[in-house]
Image (cartoon, grey):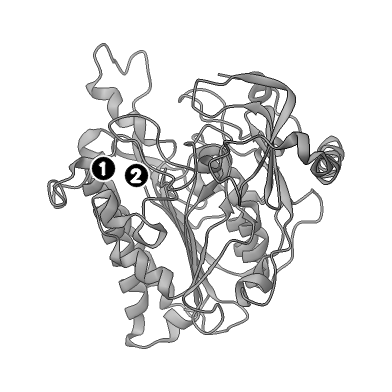
């Protein structure tokens, strides 16, 4: 383990399709059918953000998290079926690669990857010493029980594992039975790795992307029926328990406070809530689900704990974006950013360390869905170029964009463009600067990914 405060350990836990309004510390919990005491306790020990923003769905957010770059740059703009080109190109640099190669961190990935499913693009090829989990996503667990499915015509989904320098291998078919078991297995894998990592004296980075609450949202047998509110609530109770197991193991290492006090723990979600019944989630006061440009898609839970450094029991509405995590964690580790490409993430470390005295350095960001610039968020304002309040119900491109003040109008119901046209100036300057940067981005164009558009 590292006890050097200049190179703290890092544990990054990412929930899947967890909406802003699900957790008790965000106004949900028991109101959603399942208390979340472990994650609520984590929130009381650190900083909770109300205005942490992500990309439109799983792949774009995970790309932004790992590279600090918007997915419109990396080509990771959407989920695609197995057998088609997907994932980060070798040219991109991941957070794990930077931490391992420039700061000497041990690295592990246990969970959902969704950034490459062929040799050269698995986690063990992209900076992680070892990995265990799923290369793509969880709706594939329904394949083998679907009428007409045959492995002769569509690829079987697998749970996989691998180590750096070795080929990644299949562990077992990822079916509905394994769907119920996988989060338990992932925690066991992470606990085993943490025990080994803390014994080395070197700093470690554990990336633990949970499978819950992605559909089909099915709980482990130990949790099925425990809440009385169905599979979704049972799964939320399990998710909270798994996070609690991981934190308890981390906090108890070596029987003292050294590991806990020198470990940055981040808990967040990859995108807004699921829109499909019976697994539909909630974004609390915000409108929308993932695959939209509404606040319910952009805003998700985010908690950071770093004992003695990040103040405990603080909440903030300062603007933070998922790309900022890449940049901030490299500053936490005391290493430098890549200089050969534009990095969209900004350093939030001064704000995290003093959230009541320092403002976020971020003013806004552009929000794409696939190839389309759909909206721009700037301070308290949101400009929509394409109106997409619900998945698959887009009203199309707007001749005159809609403008909302998301503090006075969190549900984005009242277009106030006519009396606030001044807001166009800073927002369009932000767009112009980003498009200039995009035009000069040295990232090589991946022909297949550019042309593949669902």
Decide if residue 417 is on the left or right side of residue 143. right
Secondary element at image label 2: loop
Residue 199 x/y as whole percent: 41, 78
Res 130 → quadrant = bottom left
Residue 385 x/y as whole percent: 70, 29
Q: Nearer the viewer, residue 103 or 297?
A: 297
With respect to residue 257, does 285 lie above or below? above
Look at the image and tell me in which quarter the C terminus lies.
Answer: top right
Q: Residue furthest bottom?
A: 256
Q: Please say if the residues under marks 2 and 1 sit with CB atoms less than 8 Å apart.
A: yes
Decide if residue 318 is on the left or right side of residue 116. right
**Nearer to us: label 2 or label 1:** 1
Numbered badge on residue 213 = 2
The residue that mark 1 highlights is 232
Is residue 206 in sight in this rendering?
Answer: yes
Q: Nearer the viewer, residue 192 or 360?
A: 360
């Amino acid at each position: 383990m590292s006890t050097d405060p200049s190179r703290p350990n890092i544990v990054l836990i990412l929930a899947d399709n967890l909406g802003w309004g699900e957790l008790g510390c965000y106004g949900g919990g028991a109101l959603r059918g399942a208390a979340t005491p472990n994650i609520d306790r984590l929130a009381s020990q650190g900083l909770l953000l109300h205005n942490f923003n992500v990309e439109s769905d799983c792949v774009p957010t995970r790309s932004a998290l790992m590279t600090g770059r918007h997915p419109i740059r990396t080509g990771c703009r959407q989920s695609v079926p197995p057998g088609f080109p997907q994932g980060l190109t070798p040219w991109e640099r991941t957070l794990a690669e930077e931490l391992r190669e420039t700061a000497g961190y041990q690295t592990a990935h246990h969970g959902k990857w969704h950034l490459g499913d062929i040799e050269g693009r698995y986690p063990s090829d992209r900076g992680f010493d070892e990995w265990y989990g799923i290369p793509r996503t969880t709706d594939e667990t329904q394949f083998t029980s679907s009428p007409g499915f045959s492995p002769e015509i569509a690829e079987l989904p697998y749970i996989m594992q691998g180590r750096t320098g070795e080929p990644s291998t299949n562990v077992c078919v990822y079916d509905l039975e394994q769907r119920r078991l996988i989060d338990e297995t992932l925690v066991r894998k992470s606990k085993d790795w943490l025990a080994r990592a803390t014994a080395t004296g070197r700093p470690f980075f554990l990336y633990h992307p949970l499978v819950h609450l992605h559909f089909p949202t099915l709980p482990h047998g130990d949790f099925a029926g425990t809440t009385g509110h169905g599979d979704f609530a049972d799964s939320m109770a399990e998710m909270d328990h798994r996070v609690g197991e991981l934190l308890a193991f981390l906090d108890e290492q070596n029987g003292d406070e050294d590991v806990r006090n020198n470990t940055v723990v981040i808990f967040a979600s990859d995108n807004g809530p699921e829109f499909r019944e019976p697994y539909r989630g909630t974004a609390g006061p915000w409108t929308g689900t993932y695959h939209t440009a509404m606040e319910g898609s952009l805003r998700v839970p985010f908690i950071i704990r770093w004992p003695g450094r990040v103040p405990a029991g603080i909440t903030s509405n300062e603007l933070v974006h998922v790309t900022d995590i890449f940049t901030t964690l490299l500053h936490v580790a005391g290493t430098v950013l890549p200089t050969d490409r534009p990095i969209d993430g900004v350093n939030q470390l001064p704000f995290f360390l003093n959230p009541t005295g320092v403002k976020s350095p971020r003013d806004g960001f552009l929000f794409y869905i696939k190839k389309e610039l759909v909206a721009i968020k700037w301070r308290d304002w949101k400009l929509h170029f394409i109106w997409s309040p619900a998945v698959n119900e887009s009203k199309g491109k707007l001749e005159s964009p809609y403008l909302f003040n998301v503090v006075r109008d969190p549900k984005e119901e009242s277009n106030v463009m006519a009396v606030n046209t001044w807001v166009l100036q800073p927002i369009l300057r932000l767009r112009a600067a980003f498009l200039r940067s995009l035009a000069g981005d040295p990232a090589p164009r991946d022909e297949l990914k550019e042309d593949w558009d669902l």
